[in-house]
Amino acid sequence: MQFIKKNYRGFLLCLIIAIPCWLLGQAFPIVGGPVFAILAGMIITLLIKDKSSYQSGITFTSKKILQYAVILLGFGMNLSVVLQTGKQSLPIILATISTSLILSWILHKIMHIPGKISTLIGVGSSICGGSAIAATAPVIEANDEEVAQSISVIFLFNMIAALFFPTLGTIIGFSKHSGEAFGIFAGTAINDTSSVTAAASTWDSMYHLHSATLDKAVTVKLTRTLAIIPITLGLSLFKVKQAKGDNQKVDLKKIFPFFILYFILASLMTTIAINMGVSPDFFTPLKSLSKFFIVLAMAAIGLNTNVVKLIKNGGKPILLGFICWVGITIVSLCMQHILGIW
């Protein structure tokens, strides 16, 4: 009862922001509900003179609800399909993820960009946008402004990719009779699911391929999503090693991302159930709830974000995001050419 009394005001405020932003995201998937929610939260927080009665609930929503969203994301993962059809794209996925992480680390050193923002942008660019940032932020203890900065950068290049990549695919000569090449390209070079869907659906519409490109792109994208597991576990182990090196007392419960284990469990449950004959549609409500939870958490993050500070510090992160995005695009195309897909 005390928990509800402490948190309900902030949670309700986030919910009031999240519901219309979720609907806007459905209407404009190229932008997406999470971006609308962050923007709305940043604007509304300027209008609230005293947030003290809301703060506990806002913090709960931005931290815990974000982790619940990642756990529920596991119910969208049929590991049998992902592993079976994702093998072809695995070398490309590994190459693009490595490229983004290496570039973000190098630019963090050269441009003196804060380490947590560099990590979030590198992981978000290479894996799956907002979902990867949601999974990584608790592990590296990123604050809400760092999360908002990273999401904003990822959104910018998501939108550009969704609009530009179908034209780019035509210019460079992807097959117009098969959705395979462009589907793999969209699935490996665009990070957020909504933008992958938008680009792949556009290609299908342009060349009358029904849903061939979309099916391929989404499967490749789901394969990329699995990289959340080794990345978050690797970062947590790095934090343990770093803490020991600094002679700090290590609390494994605080550092280890236990919610990732629940994500894995949800994925295994989904895979076993589908292989036993349960319809994939059974898990659709849980997948939708996961996406809504991300929108809800982003509303809270927006409420905790100083928009003036965000704009003032935005130049270097945007440049970092741009270089990671270009690097991933080039490596994806080169790997497809090497593997004979394009």
Image (cartoon, rainbow, N blue to C red):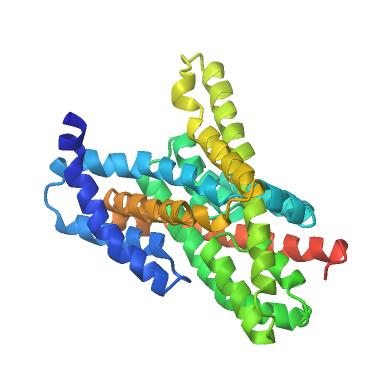
Which is more toward the observer, 183 or 273?
A: 273
| 112, above or below 31, in the image | above
- The x and y percentages for residue 125 are 58, 55
Give the number of marks: 0
Examine the image and state in which quarter residue 62 appears: top left
- The x and y percentages for residue 97 are 67, 50
Quadrant the N terminus occupies: top left
In the image: residue 255, left or right of residue 33: right
Examine the image and state in which quarter residue 23 appears: bottom left
- The x and y percentages for residue 268 are 61, 40
| 297, above or below 34, in the image | above
| 4, above or below 301, in the image | above
Q: Residue at x 54, y 27 (%)?
A: 239
Q: Residue at x 67, y 52 (%)?
A: 223
In the image: residue 167, left or right of residue 37: right
Which is more toward the observer, 1 or 283?
A: 283
Quadrant the C terminus occupies: bottom right
Q: Residue at x 58, y 45 (%)?
A: 270
